Image: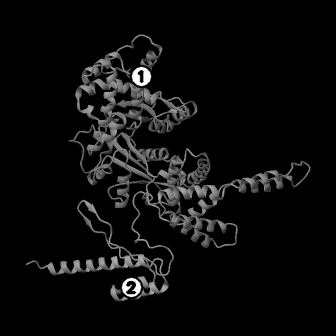
Amino acid sequence: MYPCNATVREALLTLRKLYLDGRRVERSALWVAGGSTIQKRQLTEYLAGSTPRILSERVNKNHTMTAPIPIVRRGVSLAPISLGSFSSGYDRPFTPSPMPSPPSSPPAPSSPSGLLQATKDALKKAVSRRDSKTSVMVIDDDMRDMCYFYSRLGTDERSDFLIYMATTLSTNHKALHDLIQQKPKLDVDAEDTVAQLLRWEDRLRLAVQPPHHWVFSQISRLSGGVKFLVDMRQDLLSTLYSKASEPCHSAVLKTLDSTLRELLSLWFTVGLLNVQRITWESPCNMLQKVSEYEAVHPVRNWTDLKRRVGLYRRCFIFTHSCMPKEPLVVLHIFLTNEISKSMAKILQTSRASSFDEAIVSKESEEPSLINTAIFYSIASTQKGLQGIELGNYLIKRVVHELKAEFPSMSQFSSLSPIPGFVKWLNGMMARAQRGEAQIFTETELSTLQSSLELESFAQVYDRLRKLFTTNGWVEELEMVEALEVPLMRLCAYYLFLEKRRGYALDSVANFHLKNGAVMWRINWLADRSPRGLANSCGIMVNYRYFLEECENNSRTYLETTRITASDSVMFLARTAEKILKDSLTGSASPPEFSRTVSAPAITITPDSKI
C-alpha cells in the first residue's frame, strides 16, 4: 500500500545498528580506559568483526570518530548519538565525540572529577621547563594537557586549582628583596654606572613579574587559548567573590586577576577588534548566540529574532581574531524619526514608530524617513572580560557606520533600563517607615492609603513592597496614576543624585555618562515586561548622544563627577531632594504637585549646550 515502507524500514534498521554499535563501543571504551594493552587489543579485534569496516579502521588507526547528525523532535532537542570516541594507545580518559561549542561556555560540573592533582602536575611539569633548553612544542603539549584537565574539573576543584596557582606561582619575595640589596651605587665618575643600573633594572623587572604571567602567555599561544583564559578569568572572579572573607587567599587571587586582566586588556584592544553587522543572512550559529546572549530584552522566538535584525533594525557585534565565532559585545539599534519612549513600539512593530503605513514599504527601508538611532540593548557576552571597556568603543564605531549609511541621521539616543531602582526604592521605603526620611508628600500618602484601602500610612510601605514584588499594581489604573508622579520623581533622584565614589550609583547611567551622553528624559512605564517592572517599575531613561559635545561631557563627568542632564530631569531630581531635605530638617510640609509634573519646557538641538 505504501511503496516507501521498505526504504524507510531499511533506513531505520541501519540507524538502529549504528546506535547499538556506538553504545557498545562507548561502554567498551569506558571499560578499558585504564586497562592493559592486551585488553585493548582484544577489544579492537572484537570491533573489527562486529562493526562496519570504516568504524573498525578508525578504531585501529586511533582516529576520533565523528558523531552523526543529532535527532531533533518538535520541542525537544536530544543529545547526538555518538559512535564512541577513544584512543587505544593514549592515556587520556574517554570523552564523547566533540560537537560545536555552545554559545556560552558550559558551567563547571558541580561534582568533583578527581583530576585536580593531574591538573597541578601538568602545570608543575610545564613550569619546570621554563628555564631549560626544551622545545617550545613540548611546553605547548604540557600546557595543552593542563588546559584539558582543567576544563573537566568541578567548581570547587577549579577554585582550589586557582588558589594553588596564585600561591605557588607568585612573586618570590625573598629573591626580590635580595636583588634590591644588590642595587649598584650611583657613581657619577664611573662610565659603566648607567649600564649597570639598566642591567639591574632588567633583572628587577623579571623578578617582580610573577611566574603565572609566563603561564598565561604560553596558554595564549595555543589554539583556543585566549578563549580558555577568558573562561578561566570568569572562574577566577567567582572564586574571588567566594573567598572575599579569607584575606590570605583573597590577596594572592587579586594579584592573579590583576595579571590576567592586564594581559586580556592588551589582547582585546580596540585595534584588534572587528565590527560585524548581523543580518538574517548571517550564519545560523551566530544568530543563535546573539539570541541567547540578549539579556536586557530576551528574544522570544525566531520570528522575534528575524524582526530584530530586519528592516529598520541594526545589530552589530565586536569579534576578535582569536574568537571569530564568539560575539564579545552585542548592540541592538532601532531606526526611526523620533526618540522612542517605550519598548513596546520597538519590539512589536517592524517599522519605525511614527511612520505612516501608507508610505512605508514592507520589503525595503526608506532612508529619507530615518534620522534617529535608538540604542535599546547593549550586552557584554563574556564575563571573563569584566572591567575591560568594549561597549563604549562599539557605540562610537557604530555611530560612524550609521552616519555613513544615513547622512541625514542627526539624533542618537539610548532607551536604557534602570536595573537597581526598585532595590534602592525598597531601602528608602524602609527608612521612611522608620521615620528617618520622607519620600512621599502627605497628599500622595493619603491617595495611596485610600487606593490600597489601608488604615494607616505605615501600612502603605509594606503593601507597596509586596506590590512591587508581584507587579500586580500595573494592572490597576488607579494605582498607576497614584504612583506615576512620586516614582518618576524618586527615579530622577536615584539617577541624578545618588552616587558611589562620586559617580552615578546606577551602573547603566555610569556607562553612558562616561561615554559623554546626556541624561535626557525619564519615561513612565516604558518597559512593561516582568523584568522591567521588577527592576525599575517599568521606568526607562533616554541617554542622548550629542556628537559634538560627547568628549567635553565625558571629561567633565570623569574629572569633576558632574552629571550633564536636561532641565526636566534636574527639575524632578531637585523636587525629590527638597522633599527629602525638608523631612530631615523638620520643616513644614513640602508643596504638593499635580499628577502631571510640569517640567520647564526645553528645546535641545545638536548644537545646544545643556
Residue 392, position as x, y percentages in the image: 48, 44
Task: Tell me the element at label 1.
Answer: loop
Residue 553, position as x, y percentages in the image: 51, 33
Q: Is residue 603 visible?
A: no
Above or below — where is 496 with respect to 173? Answer: above
| Residue bearing the label numbered 1 | 434
Q: Which mark is residue 56?
A: 2
Mark 1: amino acid: Arg
Above or below — where is 99 with respect to 431? Answer: below
The number of numbered badges drawn on the structure is 2
Q: CA distance from mark 2 to mark 1?
A: 77 Å
Q: Nearer the viewer, mark 2 or mark 1?
A: 1
**Pointer 1 local density, CA inside 10 Å: few below 14, some 14–19, many at least 20:** few
**Which of the 4 image quadrants contains residue 288?**
bottom left
291 lies left or right of 213: left
Residue at 32% x, 23% y: name it. 459
Mark 2: amino acid: Ser
Task: Tell me the element at label 2.
Answer: helix
Residue that protrudes farthest toward the right in the picture: 189
236 lies left or right of 184: left
Q: How is the image coloured?
A: one colour
Residue 52, position as x, y percentages in the image: 33, 85
